[in-house]
Amino acid sequence: MTQATPVYAGPPFDPPGEPDLVVVGAASRDLAADDPRGWRLGGAAAYCSLTAARLGLHVRCLLGVDGAAASADELGMLTDAGVELRLVPLNRGPVFQNVEVAGSRRQRWFSKSDAVAPSALPVEWRGAAAWLLVPVAGEIGEEWAAELAAISGARVGLGWQGLLREFGPDGWVHNTEPRPSPLLSMAGLVCASRHDLEPLMTLGQLRPLAPLAAIVLTSGSAGGVVFRGTDEARYQSLLSSAEVDPTGAGDVFLAALMVAWLATGEPATADALRFAAAAGSCAIERVGLAGVPTREEVAVRLGEAAARPRARPTGASPAESGA
C-alpha cells in the first residue's frame, strides 16, 4: 500500500506578517581544499535557516559571524531564499575540519566561538512564537532560556550537538556527558546524533533531561529513533541518488522536523520524520549549502519513496507508522 504525500510537502501555510521561526546560532567555517578560500560556510544556523525558508516558512536568523564569514558569498543564498538575516560580529567564530577516521567523521577544531547573546536580538524579533536554537560550539548560553521563558506558548526546538562538544587541547572535538540544562528543560523538540551521545542513552536517561520534548536521535543512513513521551519508535532513512557531501544533512533534517511541527502542531510524528528524512536525503547530493533542498525536491523524494514498501517503525502502532 503506497502512502499519500504529507500535506506539509508543499507550503505549510501562507507566511504571516510576523516570522514563523527565529533561528539562532553561529556560522562556522569548514575547511575545504576544493574552495578557493580554503573554507566553506557552514554551521547549523545557516543550514537550518535556509532549509526552513526553502520549505515555506518566514525565517529570521540571528547569526554569529567572524570577520571572514561576514563577507561569505553563501549568505546571499539565505537572503535570496527570504531569510531576514541579522549578523552578530564575533571576534572568534567556529572553524572546523571534518576528517574521515575509520569510516566515521571526526572534527578538528581551529577556533572556538564567542557567545551569541540575547541582547543582540532586535526588539521587533522578541516575542516570536517559534524558535530553533542550534549551537555548534557552545555559543548559545543558558541565558537564552530566560529570554524564551518570557514568551507564552513559544515552541522551542534545540539542536543538542553544540552543547555536547568539548574542544580538546589535542585539537580534536570530543563528546561530553549530557547534563541538565534550562534550554533542554523547556524544549519541545530536541535532535542529536547517536554519535554525540555515546554510550547510547536510553529513554530513562534522556527523559529527565528533556521532560517536555520529542527527542530524536539520528543515525544517518541507518535511520534513527524517536522518544515521544514514554514511547520509543524507530524511523527509516530514505534513499538518495548519490552521496556527495553529508555535511549539514542532520541540520536539514532538524529544520524539516521544525517546519512539520509548526505546520501540524505535533512534533516528530511518523509522517514528520519521513518528511525530514526526505529532506536530509536530498541534502547530501550537492556540496555545502547548495545541497539544501526546495519543497518541490522534497515532494519528489517523498513521491519516489511512496512507490516503495514502507516498513513500520519498531514500537509503533499501525496508525503511528502510517500503515
Image (tube, rainbow, N blue to C red):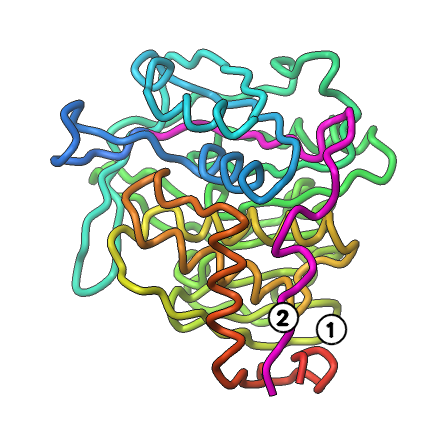
Q: In the structure shown, which secondary structural element does the residue marked by tag 1 occupy?
A: loop
When asked about the image quadrant of residue 125, the answer is top right
Query: What's under tag 2, amino acid-wise?
Result: Leu
Note whether 154 is above or below 91 in the view shown: below
| Left/right of residue 96 with respect to residue 47 in the rendered view | left
Give the Cα separation between the discs numbered 2 and 1: 8 Å
In the rendered structure, which amino acid carries the disc numbered 1? Thr
The foreground one among 278 and 136 is 278
Magenta segment, prevailing SS (helix, strand or loop): loop
Q: Secondary structure at mark 2?
A: helix
Q: Are marks 2 and 1 in contact (CB under 8 Å)?
A: yes
Q: Nearer the viewer, residue 182 or 192?
A: 192
Residue 30: give its label: none
Is the residue 293 above or below the residue 115 in the image? below
Identify the residue at image location x=66%, y=46%.
11
Question: How busy is the neighbourhood of tag 2: few (under 14 within 10 Å), some, or many (20 plus)?
Answer: some
Q: Which is more N-terminal, label 1 or label 2?
A: 2
Q: Let me know if residue 103 is in the magenta part.
A: no
* Residue at image point 36% right, 45% down: 291
Which disc is residue 203 wearing? 2
Q: Who's the residue at 76% across and 25% down the image? A: 18
Q: Is residue 267 left or right of residue 37?
A: right
The range drawn in magenta is 1-28
Question: In the rendered image, which residue does mark 1 sit on?
Answer: 230
Q: Is residue 319 left or right of residue 66?
A: right
Q: Quadrant of residue 314?
A: bottom right
Percent position of residue 61, x then y: 57, 26
Image quadrant in which you'd find residue 73: top left
Q: Which residue appears at 29% of the width and 40% of the height?
A: 168
